[in-house]
Image: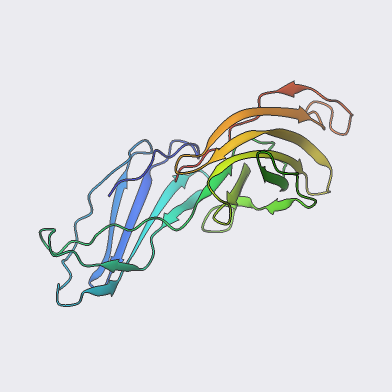
Amino acid sequence: MSWPQVIGFGAGDIRIEWTNANGAYTARVSGDATSTVINGAPISPATVDYHQKVKIYKESAQGDILLAESPDSFIYDPNIAGGSTSTARMKRSVLYFSGLRADARSLQLFLWRSGDSKPAMPISVPAAKTIAGSLIPGWFIFDWNNFAIGDYNYEFTTFDSAGNALDYAHGQLTLGRNPTVNGKFIDTVQPVFTPGAPSRTSSPVPKPTTPL
């Protein structure tokens, strides 16, 4: 199996888990790998449609992070030797906002198509967590499955646990198979060196990345 390059989350390994009617099988590769082979007991071709699951994890200092999981229905392909299964697309289309302030606990996002009006209400983007539920400092994950492929404007503000605004960012991005950030600017509302003091400085915003 193969996947796009995983960006971020440190230098930990990537772990792939394949579960089917005969058992569970695991492969572990380096964090910069984009493919591997998992060997397991074959499934009888007598059943055309059967259930199995593939999950891809990134191992990080905070714990394991579930990057993607397959649909649980795979179709048997008799043209592949050994009774292998055809591949299925991953369920999730996500953007990872990384490199933000470690004390950021929430992110409010405005996202609208180029040429359209900015929406009245923001989207609450959840903080990224490990499968054990631990927060990954400075990371947020946005599922854009409900948005069409195309060019967008975005704005977002991060907040600490007390509700104080930390950083404001805006720019343009393209959603698609490989989402791309086309322009980005960030304003620091609460400087790290003097928390609570008003200030506005502009610099490039950390690029939202999409490992999948």
Q: Is residue 202 above or below residue 116?
A: above
Q: How is the image coloured?
A: rainbow
Q: Is residue 74 above or below residue 171?
A: below
Residue that appears at 89% across and 29% down: 197
31 left or right of 203 in image:
left
Residue that appears at 76% across and 35% down: 168
Is residue 62 visible to the viewer in this orientation of the structure? no
Estimate the x, y position of residue 16 in percent, counting from the top left.
Answer: 34, 53
> Which residue is at the front of the view, 178 or 61?
178
Estimate the x, y position of residue 47 in percent, counting from the top left.
Answer: 19, 77
Q: As drawn, which residue projects farthest toward the left?
A: 81
Q: As drawn, which residue projects farthest toward the bottom?
A: 46
Quarter of the image where one finds residue 174: top right
198 left or right of 175 in image:
right
Residue that appears at 77% across and 44% down: 159
Is residue 140 visible to the viewer in this orientation of the structure? yes
Estimate the x, y position of residue 148 in percent, counting from the top left.
Answer: 55, 50
208 left or right of 204 in image:
left
> Which residue is at the front of the view, 160 or 91?
91
Quarter of the image where one finds residue 152: top right
Residue that appears at 45% across and 58% down: 91
Quarter of the image where one finds residue 157: top right
> Which residue is at the front of the view, 8 or 93?
93
Estimate the x, y position of residue 135 in percent, counting from the top left.
Answer: 62, 50
Q: As drawn, which residue projects farthest toward the front?
A: 115
Q: Please tell me how many numbered marks the rendered image carries.
A: 0
